[in-house]
Amino acid sequence: MRSKNWTLLVAGLLLACCLLSACDRGNRTEGHSSSRQSKLTREIYAMDTIMNLTLYGFREDGQELSERELGGIMNQAVSLVGHLEALFSVTEKNSDISKINAADGAPVAVSDETYELLEQCIHYSDRTEGFFDVSVYPLVKLWGFTTGEYRVPTEDEIQEVRGRIDYRKIRLSKGNQVQLERGMQIDLGAAAKGYLSQRLMELFQKSGVESAIVSLGGNVQTMGLKADGTRYRIGIVDPADGTSIYGTLEAENKAVITSGTYQRYFERDGRTYHHIMDKRTGRPAENGLASVTVIAEDGTMGDILATALYVMGEERAVEYQKEHPETDIILIRKDGSLWQSSPILSKQK
């Protein structure tokens, strides 16, 4: 059995090792000299994973941000991480999500951020025909993925919980009011890191930073180019072992987000059960996929789609991407083979 945190920590560290390796495009951005350009990196632990935040101190006007300015921006970024984690945590009793889940059907006033993220979750649930659903949390809890006390529930237990899952029954109203039907519970974990990375990019942009990269476990998002004018290179974890790199891709102003069976799982009686639930069956989704990577301009959308497309399975995921070609996807099957919407991933030799 592999613990949730250990798997994510290893994957996060491997990604961080690849993040700052640039590909050679044979050109430079005027004024971005790596010998004079400042850089600041901070590593923190939040949302159950290691997070690496890296800022580069140049701006479009050719002037550099001072070390003091860069440090101030980084401190704001770390504060934002803590702020959003406190709002979205499903285990912290004073979080917005815990208050909603404990309200027993009564409306709860939440923060602007929680309300905004719930709006986006419901929007993409509609867009993905319900394959993404924040109200699936009771199923995740039933299988023990929230506590680490893993179990295979009975069919009766599964069917009882399935009857309480339906994102369409989440009511949002004026004054940031959120109301669930009695017995329902939600979890924003499948969207929170994507939302966070998007908010971090917005903070950096407003602060005058031209280039940045954040690695939040299986979520990576970039802004601009590196100091030498090259794109960031990002490693995609091989789901066969959850530690090595399957391949790399280049990214500029993109979120690269992976959802895979290797991230959280347990074994019972020779079978492996992972955490990505299919609400249609009440069981872990089984469709021949090992991981789905989404490359999108928006981190929230990328995070949500990575989960939704995994649950859809290959055939429907490919159809979805063709309907929305602005988003690239990479599907790695359990047999190690690959499908990608465009030739962006270079496999490791």
Image (cartoon, rainbow, N blue to C red):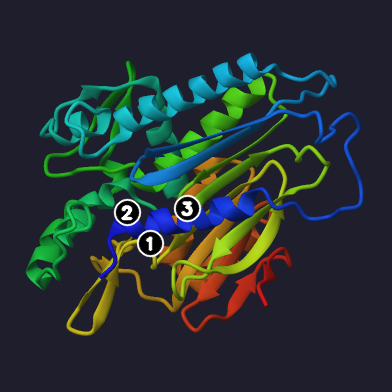
Q: Nearer the viewer, residue 267 or 20?
A: 20
Q: CA distance from mark 3 to mark 1?
A: 11 Å
Mark 2: few/some/many CA within 10 Å (<14, 14-19, 20+): some
Where's residue 102, x and y in %? 13, 33
| Residue on which the image places disc 1 | 263
Q: CA distance from mark 2 to mark 1?
A: 9 Å
Label 3: state its secondary structure. helix
The amino acid pointed to by label 3 is Gly
In the shown orientation, is residue 218 left or right of residue 162?
A: right
In the picture as drawn, the residue positioned furthest to the front comes out as: 35
Q: Residue at x 41, y 33 (%)?
A: 117
Task: Tell me, yes or no, if residue 130 can be seen here.
Answer: no
Picture quarter containing residue 5? bottom left
Where's residue 320, x and y in %? 57, 61
Q: Residue at x 71, y 18 (%)?
A: 65
Q: Residue at x 65, y 45 (%)?
A: 254
Label 1: state its secondary structure. loop
Q: In the drawing, what numbered circle is on residue 5?
A: 2
Mark 3: few/some/many CA within 10 Å (<14, 14-19, 20+): many
| Residue on which the image places disc 3 | 12
> Which quadrant, please, contains the C terminus?
bottom right
Sequence-first tag of 2 and 3: 2
Q: Nearer the viewer, residue 340 or 67?
A: 67
Q: Residue at x 26, y 28 (%)?
A: 96
Where's residue 44, x and y in %? 43, 37
Sequence-first tag of 2 and 1: 2
Rendered position, 248 above or below 205: below
The amino acid pointed to by label 1 is Gln
Picture quarter containing residue 18? bottom right
